[in-house]
Image (cartoon, rainbow, N blue to C red):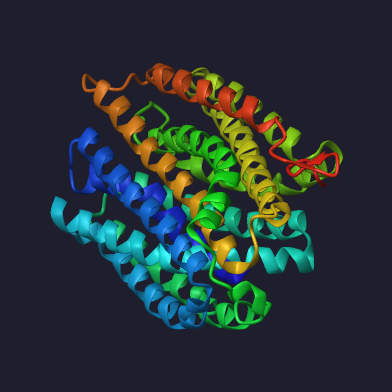
Amino acid sequence: MASHLAKNLLWSGEDAFAFYILVVVLRLDPVLAGGLFLAGSAWNAVVDFAWGAVLAHRPQLGRWLPIVTGIAVPVACVSFALLPISGSVGVAMALILVFRTSFALFDVPHNALNMPLAERYGHLTLMRLRSIAAAAGALVVAALALPLMLVTAPWLPTALFAGMAVVAFVGLLPIPWMLARFWRGASPSFHVRPQFADIARVALCVLPFCLAQMLGAGALGAIGKGLLHLKIRTQWVLAAAPLAIGMARLAAIPAWNAIARRRGIAQGLSIAYFCIGAVILLLPVAVGGGPVGALIAFAVFGALVSGIALLAWSGFSQLVAHEPAIRGPGDSSLAYGLFTATSKIGLGASACIAGNWLESQSDGIAPDGSALWPLALATAALCAACSLVAGRPVRKIGGQSATALG
């Protein structure tokens, strides 16, 4: 859990602040910054899928994973820490690519450990622990957004990124040991090299679920990035928004766990997407309606994000566990690599959506929050589409859907 918390601290910090750094610190055009962020996400997606495919095709490479991840962890932390002082577009892009490559090298096999761990602890239980760690990491990042948005000291971004990198490095140290223990403990049958057709079968069986979550990641990521650039009369409210979202996200995990056990994961995920689309439509009104209404809307938004994060990962974990085409940690790496790859494409697209929205406000963002309407309408429509897709069974297993099992 400590490693997952550290991993999410690093990832949440890069996802939340990289676009902000490109636009505010490096003063890039918002559309160009969004394109750079999307390029980094697309590259990350390629590495995720390719690395997962390599591990699926040659599971025996698992014995080298402690060494590979032992190198990738410090490289990711250093490249993350250097982003605020990159000084130019070329250096910033190089650091983003290095970070996302090294992050993928330990993220994909670490996610694949969900398969043996879920067999021991249960899918929903394991994903609840993961969600708590992810929400805690996001909460730390949200707390750091307060000084970043309210204090104009030029040294502050560098200090924040360096501090997060050091903490993340310490927390990520157990990952090589975990891979050495659990990967090597796999059954010998897992080390039979599959053919290309087997790899394609693994990818195709999880692709529909992955694409649905890609849309959701794009919608929710665009809202999060857009909020950092709003300018309203009570600016402290926007600075506190990530903190309100993070606190509500952590607090709501038990409620979503109960909903999943009562209504099933698929239906719970569908409800979460539908409700968050409605809340997004209320954000322009809430932001312009005063501090109290805005903070309540942000907290509700965070509580619904909590449900999506928990139930999407839980549903995917069950799908991987019950899919006959997925056998062992190599195939699991491929499946999780595809899942994270498509999610990262969605997050990259969210920066493009936010960048184009920001560019459209070149005459000045209205101080009453009305500038959010174009972004809110687009992202709410994506959430509605995700709600429709999420409610449909992914695969039938003994009369039940893989995503409906409690």
- x, y (%) of residue 272? 67, 33
Q: Is 328 situated above or below 370?
A: below
Q: How many marks?
A: 0
| Residue 381 point in image, percent of width and height | 52, 20
**Where does residue 246 sit, x and y in percent of width and height?**
57, 47
Q: Is residue 42 left or right of residue 175?
A: left
Residue at figure coordinates x 44%, y 61% from the top left: 10
Residue 212: name its quadrant: top right
Q: In the depicted view, which residue is nearer to us: 59 or 115?
A: 59
- Is 65 placed above or below 103 here? below
Q: Residue at x 69, y 36 (%)?
A: 269
158 left or right, relative to 265: left
Residue plotted at (25% across, 57% down): 84
| Any part of residue 88 in sight | no
> Would you say 378 lies left or right of 352 here?
right
Q: Residue at x 38, y 27 (%)?
A: 232
Q: Nearer the viewer, residue 5 or 352?
A: 352
The residue closer to the viewer here, 284 or 235, is 284
Q: Which image quadrant: the N terminus?
A: bottom right
Q: Quadrant of residue 184?
A: bottom right
Q: Quadrant of residue 227?
A: top left
Q: Is residue 29 above or below residue 172?
A: above
Q: Position of residue 242 (x, y in %)?
A: 50, 43
Going by the image, does 77 lie left or right of 133? left
Note whether residue 219 is visible. Answer: yes
